[in-house]
Image (cartoon, rainbow, N blue to C red):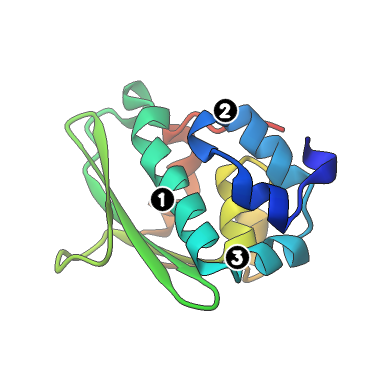
Amino acid sequence: MADSVNLDNLAELDFAGVSPEEFAKIVKGLSSKEINEIARDEPLRARVLAEVFGRMGRQFKPETAGGLEALIRWKVTGASDAVYETRIANGVCTVSEGRSDAEPRVTLVLGDAEFLKLVSGNANPVTMFMTRKLKIAGDVALAAGLTRYFDIPKA
């Protein structure tokens, strides 16, 4: 499927029916340029982001978080900025769209392609940070360890 992904068949895709592993393969099959092209379709971009963030709670591994309490703000930049927040507390991860008045422990800023590659296991967050494709404000140590709190598929 990943070999034939384009804007037309991606727009038809029922993301809720795509497993994290299948999603990782789709993302792996796309270049950053292709992902950014797809992200220009604002309704499609909103659907993809809503599905990815919607899955974070299900992909969360509470056993690795222990007593961690943190608000993580995600700013995905593109034609427009999308902001989501994930709150980890009491062994639960909740996600909300938009920016709250609460002070995040860490804010992650990255483009559409970088975000999708990161959450699908197709990019190394340390490399992304070192090459300035991922900007971090706040608790860098928390940001560096975020991937261990989620079951991230490998394509």
Q: Residue at x 65, y 65 (%)?
A: 130
Residue 84, how many percent across, how many down? 34, 59
Which residue is identified by label 3? 39
What's the residue at 67%, 67% (across, down)? 36
Q: Secondary structure at mark 1?
A: helix
Point out the image quarter for the N terminus. Answer: top right
How far apart are the two marked residues, 3 and 1, measured between alpha carbons? 13 Å
Q: Nearer the viewer, residue 138 or 7?
A: 7
Hey, what amino acid is under mark 1?
A: Ala
Q: Which mark is residue 19?
A: 2
Please tell me whether mark 3 sits on a helix, a strand or a loop: helix
List the single residue furthest toward the bottom.
79
* Extreme residue toward the right, this view: 3
The residue singled out by tag 1 in the image is 50
Q: Position of residue 56 (x, y in %)?
A: 39, 38
Q: Mark 3 is on which residue type?
A: Ala
Q: CA distance from mark 2 to mark 3?
A: 20 Å
Occupied quadrant, residue 72: bottom left
